[in-house]
Image (spheres, helix red, strand yellow):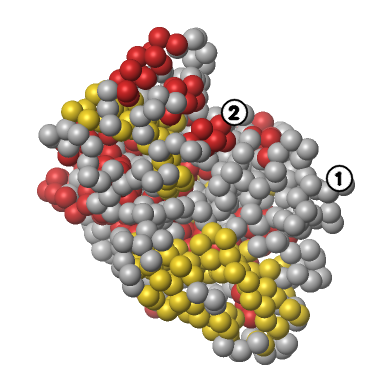
Amino acid sequence: MASPSATPARFFNLDERDYAAAEQRCRALLARMTLAEKVGQMSQFTSDRDTTGPSIREGYQDDIREGRVGSIFNAFDADFTRQLQTLAVNESRLGIPLLFGYDVVHGFRTIFPIPLAMASSWHPEGVEAAARVAATEAAAAGIHWAFAPMVDVSRDARWGRVMEGAGEDPLLSSRMASAQVRGYQGHDPRALDSVAACVKHYAGYGAAEAGRDYNSVDLSERVMRSVHLPPHQAAVNAGVASVMTSFNTVDGVPASCNALLLRQILRDEWQFRGLVVTDYTAIMELLEHGVAADARDAARLAVNAGVDMDMQDGYFLDHLAELVEADDVSAARIDEATLRVLILKDVLGLFEDPYRYCDEAREATALLAPEHRRKAREMAQQSMVLLENNDLLPLSPAPQRLAVIGELADSRADLLGPWHGNGHAQDAHTLLEALRGRLSSAEIYYHAGVPVDIDDTASRQREIAEAVTTAQQADVAVVVVGEKEPMSGEAASRTDLGLPGQQLALALAILASGTPTVVVTLSGRPLVLSELTAALTGQSAALLHGWWPGSEGAEALVDLLLGDVSPCARLPMSFPRSVGQLPLYYGQLPTGRPVFRENPDPRYSSKYIDSPNTPLYPFGYGLSYTHVDYATPQLDKPTLTGPDDQLTLNIELTNTGERDGVEVVQLYLRDPVASISRPVRELIDFKRIEIAAGARERISFIIRAEQLGFIGSDLRWRCEAGRFELHIGAHVEDTQTLTFDYQP
Ligand code: BGC
């Protein structure tokens, strides 16, 4: 949760002296710049190497020569970035180097699982290591600035961009946010494997109405501050170098000209010192939002609200000078913004050596380094969530005759997921290839099943019958179903979250074939799997949700299927029973007419008449190949007496299974009586522990008053006296309860 007092924001890991020295050097440069050159530094354009939005500006290379651009994005590799950098350094009047930005979201060339999958690991250190690998590769390919982490809290799986964030919970998202900032930025901005991070999208983007991308957001400021801002603040506190504004309006005001977000909260309250860049053409979109009369007006609104750099629309470039001359924008505002751009370049060492990131030799060894692939495989193993297992997994001993079914089982590209940077499909194996590689003495039969396309409504009886015949030849069938890459991600909202096309019919037919069946689902979002799950009952079957697992995803899947490692991931987002339940999240308020477990069907209660309120799979849920018993938890004392006091919760866990495992112990809070209605559960801490077969581990959680606090109706953070409940367990619906009093 948001802490009561903002700690002064660091910029990278710089101490005050180094920051002040960088500022002094940059002020000297600023003094030599013309207004046009300053505005150039505040402008960013895409190269033609890659496209991530609607328009390509013609002549960006001339912009570089003329000093009309401070940063280029979508340009990478040592050779190409050197060519562009040479234009800036040798041909622009002041020779100010360019800053190269790119969407390095879950890897650069070695692609890790999508961020939502990585969040399923509940393993911030692993996620930090993944970001470190991504930074090392990106930096070797000329990139200075990663447009990541994406930290939008999202509770509506219709929104395609849920795949980029850490799911529905502010605490888990905050831990993932700071881990990624540490990973990208490293310990020292001057290190050759450090890149600047950019936390995005600020703010509220994950709450797009009806889960439709770019749609309006209407949140109370209290909910915005309590749920959506904490991961951004965590990134700021971790020293993030930059912030990207979001496309959406918030309470009618677009985030890219929102002074409450950009000035009051980000600068005044959090004391953020880095750079604010817009999202792609977000200033131009102020016209469509209906808050700017023309391009000049849009530029004025954005810059005066606190935007420092304009991504792609060129509105700053075209209008800021004129706005300053007309006194509609102050010269001081331009200096402030330009200085932030220069400071970022300075601390990355670009003024000393503009080419320090362009190194072909480093690029050749860093990209896809064996160590990077190993980490991606480990992270993929830790990201896949075992949802059901009726005594089928692991497949040990390995089957002699295996049927592999489904188009996705033989796809490389669909393992990487959107925002896969410079990832190449050919760097990955398909699951079919990985199984063939590993089970060289087994007979493996493959059938592609049915197409994955959403609009594939044609009858597929023949293909399904053939796939069933294929399955019946084998001891075990592995059916891979789910989404193809374009079905989640930006501008990929869906109203139907079932398996696209005829894949459900395919999976049901294989399950009914009599052959023990493992269903593997791949997707960028929670899917509606109710019918599939029901069909597993009573069958020798299992359901493993693989998300989009990245370049090493197929190998990791095989590791899990064969039992080389045990699954240990836990859901970072509730899986709904139906789309009608959305938005769906565990941390709801209780309502005045709650549905109690003891009486699930009272007439006048807050429920549906055709579905339980609960998700199909709850937040924090996931199985493994072992079993961990939780003993009765104990608190060391019954009362917390003030802000400096602490309680200790101890609990003993025993791995009663036969395999080593990893347990994610989750600690939730409930404040049953407060000045405002509080969520029925709120994650306040978690611990991920490795526990050997047969071992017993004692773990402790420290509980402090600050974890009990919340933002009240007056928008102030508070911590109220009273009785509190703690719920500890393996997921949000499987906990033991303790109580204590807070009496300051
Ligand atoms: C996305 C951002 C991304 C930017 C630059 C936009 O469309 O919303 O997340 O960083 O493009 O590629």
Location of mark 1 (residue): 603
Pinpoint residue 578: horizontal percent, then vertical percent. 63, 35
Badge 1 crowding class, 10 Å Cα cut-off, few under 14, some 14 to 19, many 20 or more, is: few
- Name the residue furthest right: 604
**Which residue is drawn at the image coordinates 76% and 80% (left, top)?**
722
Q: Which amino acid does label 1 sit on?
A: Arg
For the residue pair 439 and 708, the one nearer the viewer reads as: 439
Residue 210 against residue 33 in the figure, above or below: above
Q: Position of residue 266 (x, y in %)?
A: 60, 61
Residue located at (41% from left, 61% from top): 627
Helix, strand or loop at mark 2: loop
- Residue located at (36% from left, 34% from top): 516
Residue 123 in sight here: no
Judged left or right of residue 161, residue 591 is right
Picture coordinates of residue 187, whole percent (x, y): 32, 68
Name the disc covering residue 291, or none. none
State left or right for residue 353 relative to residue 633: left
Quarter that holds the C terminus: bottom right
**Quadrant assignment for the N terminus:** bottom right
Assess disc 2: are there few (<14), some (14-19) or many (≥20) residues with their C-alpha within 10 Å of its C-alpha: some
Three-letter code for the amino acid on which mark 2 is drawn: Asp
Q: Earlier in the sequence, mark 1 or mark 2?
A: 2
Give coordinates of residue 197: x percent, y percent.
41, 55
Query: What's the mark number on residue 496?
Result: 2
Cα distance in 3D space between marks 1 and 2: 29 Å
Looking at the picture, does residue 131 appear above or below residue 673? above
